[in-house]
Amino acid sequence: MSRDGLRGPQPGWSAISVCQLKGHSFSVPEGDGKWTWSDGHFTYFLDNSPVTDAALQSLGPMPKLNDLSLTRTLITDEAVPMIVKQFPGLEVLRLDRTTVTDKNLGELGRLKSLEQLSLFRTRISDSGCSKLAKMSTLRKLSLDQTHITDVGFKALGQISKLESLSVWKTQVTDEAAAEFSQLYPNMRLNR
């Protein structure tokens, strides 16, 4: 395996993205990730792997990919626009424990089907919350152990379809959480 996390482009992977897998799951060569097809949902898990921005780019476009998990990978802010371009059908995206910051979060708003976003233990701050607040399709958002404060937290109330928000171990105060819960009583708030 190279420093880039993969041995160059994997041409067969793009073909996989349009297969009808009918309930099967299988592993990508050398355990670099796991593909699954379940309930009409096509998922690719690259968690805990040395995948970098360059390796992610080598996957090529996969418009039918619904769910991408990049937890504990080596991707950076530069991967965010690439994710949007290559995987436009994403409904679920996990960037937990990566070095992603506020820088390119606004790009995620171009993912018109994105309903779940997890940014656990990233470097997201109030600036990023203002970008996330414009993502009208989000239903579930996790910002646990990020750098958000009451200011960014309040902005998240603008996400009209948001049903579940997790801000555990952030700088959000009890007062702000109580006010938020009163304003949005139907939203599940984890803090």
Image (tube, rainbow, N blue to C red):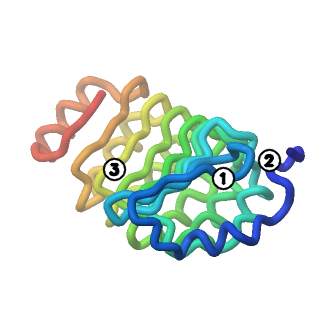
Compared across the picture, whether 175 is left or right of 47 comes to: left
Going by the numbered disc 3, the residue's amino acid type is Leu
Tell me which residue sits at (61%, 50%) in the image.
27
Q: Is residue 23 above or below residue 155?
A: below
Quarter of the picture containing the N terminus is top right
Which mark, residue 28?
A: 1
At mark 2, the secondary structure is loop
Report x, y in % for residue 165: 30, 42
Tell me which residue sits at (63%, 40%) in the image.
98
Tell me which residue sits at (61%, 64%) in the image.
83
Q: Which residue position holds label 2?
A: 5
In front of the other: 155 or 120: 120
Compared across the picture, whether 96 is left or right of 156 comes to: right
- Alpha carbon distance from label 3 to label 2: 35 Å
At mark 3, the secondary structure is helix
Q: Is residue 58 above or below residue 102?
A: below
Going by the numbered disc 2, the residue's amino acid type is Gly
The quarter of the displayed image where residue 49 is located: top right
At mark 1, the secondary structure is loop
Examine the rendering and report whether any part of residue 110 can be seen. Answer: no
Going by the numbered disc 1, the residue's amino acid type is Val
Report x, y in % for residue 80: 62, 59
Q: Is residue 114 above or below residue 150?
A: below
In front of the other: 69 or 153: 69
- Alpha carbon distance from label 1 to label 2: 13 Å
Which mark, residue 156?
A: 3
Report x, y in % for residue 81: 64, 66
CB under 8 Å between discs 1 and 2? no
Of the numbered discs 1 and 2, the one sitting upstream in the chain is 2
Of the numbered discs 1 and 3, the one sitting upstream in the chain is 1
